[in-house]
Amino acid sequence: MTNYSRRALLVSPTAPAREAAAAFADAADWVPVGEADVVIALGGDGFMLQTLHQMLERRQLAVPVFGMNLGTVGFLMNEWRPHDLDGRLSRAKQFKVTPLQMVATGVDGRTHTLPAINEVSLLRETRQTAKLEVMVNDRVVLPELACDGILAATPAGSTAYNLSAQGPILPLGSALIALTPISPFRPRRWRGAILPDKTRISLRVLDPAKRPVSAVADQREVRDVARVDITMDRARELTLLFDPEHALDDRITMEQFAA
């Protein structure tokens, strides 16, 4: 248990988050993010992803993030309450989140390496169906997948875009990756795969000139890709903090019973 004495406050630009921050101004002697031993994030799930990416870019991997929901769903957030911050931080449970690493090679030969905390997705850019070759550990498992796209999701991200695409919910700590097609046309019966998180996933775009495809790592897009390689980036593990009654692992479990 710790009270995390050096605290930084990051606030979404939305009106509810700004109003909450004003009410929260005296809750601590706030320090810059670079000096903090904990970050308090006020906003929604999108802002939490933005904050976690900021921690990756700053290489502050050991600094946990405690989010409070001022957005819509707030799956990655705790309940917004302006009081008892000391007590909540001292009781908070830690959850480790391991991002994916996407290496996207464009048709121009340039490579782009980006992290993804929720998912890496490939999406058709035009009305033409995407056609992809799917490889697992350098073995071709699907010579041609005709679809709108495909995504690889972490357990933390399995309840987001992956679930909307009819992908499976993965328990936190399950050491798995969900590989889920988006509107697959052929093969018609393929509904995706659940893979060990040590798996190397490679996706090659067939006929990228006629059927262009973009690759997205969470919120960052690379257009006109020829190939995308996806692995779990174990060297850059992040830490989220949750109130015991709103722990992330329990939320993910209960999503399997949601109507």
Image (cartoon, helix red, strand yellow):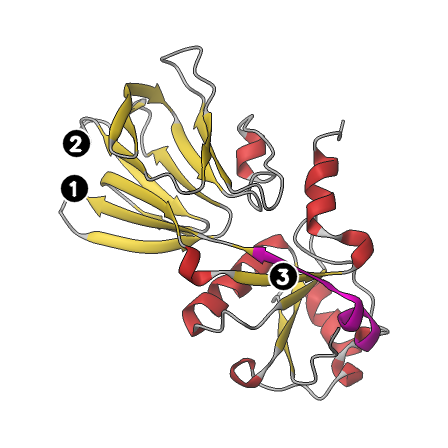
For disc 1, the neighbor class at 10 Å (few under 14, some 14 to 19, many from 20) is some
Q: In which quarter of the image is the C terminus?
A: top right
Nearer the observer, 62 or 144: 62
- Residue at the spot of label 3: 240
The single residue placed furthest to the top in the displayed view is 188
Instruction: Give the extent of the magenta segment.
Output: 86-96
Residue that badge 2 annotates: 209
Whole-angstrom CA distance, mark 1 to mark 3, is 37 Å
Q: Is residue 51 magenta?
A: no
Q: Residue furthest left?
A: 109
Q: Is residue 3 left or right of residue 62?
A: right
Which one is in front, 87 or 160? 87
Is disc 2 in contact with disc 1, using a CB cutoff of under 8 Å?
yes
Q: Residue at x 37, y 34 (%)?
A: 123
Q: What element carries label 2?
A: loop
Left or right of residue 242, residue 149 in this image: left
Residue 5 screen position, x and y as percent: 70, 85
Up/down of 149 relative to 161, above or below: above
User: Looking at the image, which is closer to me, 98 or 54?
Assistant: 98
Q: Which mark is residue 107?
A: 1
The secondary structure type at the circle numbered 1 is loop
Callout in the foreground (2, 3): 3
Label 3 amino acid? Leu
Coordinates of residue 100 in the picture (x, y in percent): 42, 49
- Say which quadrant the N terminus sits in: bottom right
| Type of amino acid at the residue the image marks with label 2 | Ala
- Which residue is at a point 58% across and 46% down the rendered structure image? 156
Quarter-wise, where is residue 67 in the image? bottom right
Q: Between disc 2 and disc 3, whose residue precedes?
A: 2
Q: Are marks 2 and 3 in contact (CB under 8 Å)?
A: no
Q: How many marks?
A: 3
